[in-house]
Image: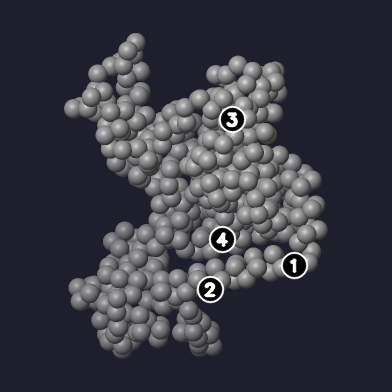
């Protein structure tokens, strides 16, 4: 490398917002960027004269990410607590020469700065929202919105604002992140975004990230050539990303992606190119990415469970869908739409009793639109010509008392540990399994956490939740 190239590289590193460390394979600190001194509470000269082993022992690095990379030979990400009381998120990568580890390069970002950026971003969002409300063109847009929403119900001001934002960003190719509780309608609004976009004639590929086992994710997402692995289809297979070419790829429950898979997805987003398993040739794929989650991804980043660079790539246009309890004006339209759908499906014309409306409007609906639609279907199937509000609403584990949970589960020592009337062993075991899973869905943030708690694989958890009709009830 020439002297000029070295000076250019040095200037880039010294003026970067991140704080850089370069460490020899034995842990000796070769270089630190000037900004690191303020974060780690020790001068750059003292840092360069030390080693990561000593810095960790002295509490300057808690823990040392470079030592983790030296131990595993793999890239790493974690949250550190420094001697100055700050929290930083650190990423480190190994440097190999002829297969031998020769150095570790790490960079860290002060989470205090990240929080300030998030607050600034929230303020900008609020100003943008206020601008929308003041815009003279808003009334015209709002009037035209009704005819463009197909089957979506957006009577409430909150949802109309969300719909207007989506319609404005739809013509672009910007990545969109749908945020909100389970069941609020993220998939439906992602489909509407696709219909508004210039890609409307292309495919809309809907992928539930939590339903694909980690071992199969790369093959499912990127595809594979014939003979790429044992059991591969004879003709190979096109991946989900390629299936979305010219259209929209919707990744639901993006927060469930393991870190290894996140790395591969980030590269595909950055390069716009993918390689099928077993294929040395890369191919360009043009698609629009929309993701959804009911988890707090910024918190997952702080915990080291989600890549910061992928988070920024995905969070270009964040769109938060409010829960149904905060937009009760939408309930009548949702009920009428579901009744029409049920009447058409089952070939009968049933009506909702007028006395039922007050109860439906008063319910909290913690499962949001999905819960409302499921309740209506149960009520429709169990009623005569008129539907009354006498169909039980589902019990939600988060709201149940510990005693009730124990009784429902049939735990030893509870009053319901015996078989129910006309119930066999298979039904009793299924009831107990469902109750345990429901309780964990209310208390744990992901299918991976449930799998660890139960001592089973994550794909088994996904399969069992689908079998029992359960979903994670809260974000991480």
Q: Residue at x 70, y 65 (%)?
A: 132
- How far is disc 4 from disc 1 in space, using C-alphas? 25 Å
Q: On the image, numbered disc 3 is attached to which residue? A: 355
Q: CB of mark 3 within 8 Å of CB of mark 2?
A: no
Q: On the image, numbered disc 2 is attached to which residue? A: 120
Q: Quadrant of residue 346?
A: top right
**Between discs 4 and 2, the one toward the N terminus:** 2
- 94 or 370: nearer the viewer: 370
Q: On the image, numbered disc 1 is attached to which residue? A: 135
Q: Residue at x 72, y 59 (%)?
A: 168
- How far is disc 3 from disc 4 in space, using C-alphas? 44 Å
Q: CB of mark 2 within 8 Å of CB of mark 1?
A: no
- How far is disc 4 from disc 2 in space, using C-alphas? 15 Å
Q: Which numbered tag is attached to residue 315? A: 4
Q: Residue furthest top?
A: 422
- How far is disc 3 from disc 1 in space, using C-alphas? 40 Å
């Amino acid at each position: 490398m020439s002297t000029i190239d070295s000076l250019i590289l040095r200037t880039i590193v010294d003026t970067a917002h991140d704080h850089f460390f370069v460490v020899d394979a034995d842990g000796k600190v070769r270089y630190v960027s000037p900004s690191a001194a303020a974060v780690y509470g020790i001068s750059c000269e003292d840092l360069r004269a030390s080693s990561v082993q000593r810095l960790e022992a002295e509490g300057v690095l808690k823990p040392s990410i470079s030592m983790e990379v030296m131990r595993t030979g793999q890239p790493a990400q974690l949250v550190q607590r420094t001697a100055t009381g700050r929290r930083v998120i650190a990423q480190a990568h190994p440097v190999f020469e002829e297969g031998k580890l020769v150095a570790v390069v790490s960079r860290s970002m002060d989470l205090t700065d990240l929080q300030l950026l998030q607050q600034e971003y929230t303020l900008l969002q609020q100003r943008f929202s206020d601008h929308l409300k003041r815009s003279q063109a808003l009334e015209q847009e709002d009037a035209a919105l009704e005819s463009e929403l197909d089957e979506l119900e957006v009577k409430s001001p909150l949802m109309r604002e969300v719909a207007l934002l989506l319609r404005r960003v739809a013509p672009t190719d910007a990545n969109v992140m749908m945020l909100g509780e389970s069941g609020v309608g993220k998939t439906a609004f992602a489909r509407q975004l696709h219909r508004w976009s210039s890609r409307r004639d292309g495919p809309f590929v809907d992928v539930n990230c939590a339903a694909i086992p980690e071992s199969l994710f790369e093959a499912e997402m990127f595809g594979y050539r014939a003979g790429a692995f044992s059991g591969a289809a004879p003709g190979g297979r096109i991946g989900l990303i390629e299936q979305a070419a010219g259209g929209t790829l919707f990744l639901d429950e993006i927060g469930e992606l393991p870190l290894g898979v996140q790395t591969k997805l980030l590269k595909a987003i950055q390069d716009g190119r993918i390689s099928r398993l077993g294929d040395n040739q890369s191919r360009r794929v043009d698609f629009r990415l929309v993701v959804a989650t009911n988890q707090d991804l910024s918190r997952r980043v702080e915990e080291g469970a989600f890549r910061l660079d992928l988070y920024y790539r995905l969070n270009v246009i964040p769109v938060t869908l409010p829960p149904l309890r905060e937009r009760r004006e939408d309930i009548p339209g949702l009920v009428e739409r579901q009744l029409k759908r049920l009447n058409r499906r089952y070939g009968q014309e049933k009506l909702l009793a007028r006395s039922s409306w007050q109860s439906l409007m008063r319910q909290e609906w913690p499962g949001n639109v999905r819960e409302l639609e499921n309740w209506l279907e149960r009520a429709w199937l169990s009623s005569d010509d008129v539907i009354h509000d006498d169909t039980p609403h589902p019990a939600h584990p988060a709201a149940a008392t510990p005693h009730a949970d124990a009784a429902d589960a049939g735990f030893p020592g509870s009053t319901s540990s015996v078989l129910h009337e006309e119930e066999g062993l298979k039904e009793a075991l299924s009831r107990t399994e469902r109750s345990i899973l429901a309780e964990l869905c209310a208390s744990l943030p992901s299918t991976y956490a449930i799998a660890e708690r139960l001592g089973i694989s994550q794909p088994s958890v996904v399969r069992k939740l689908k079998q029992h009709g359960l979903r994670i009830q809260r974000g991480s």
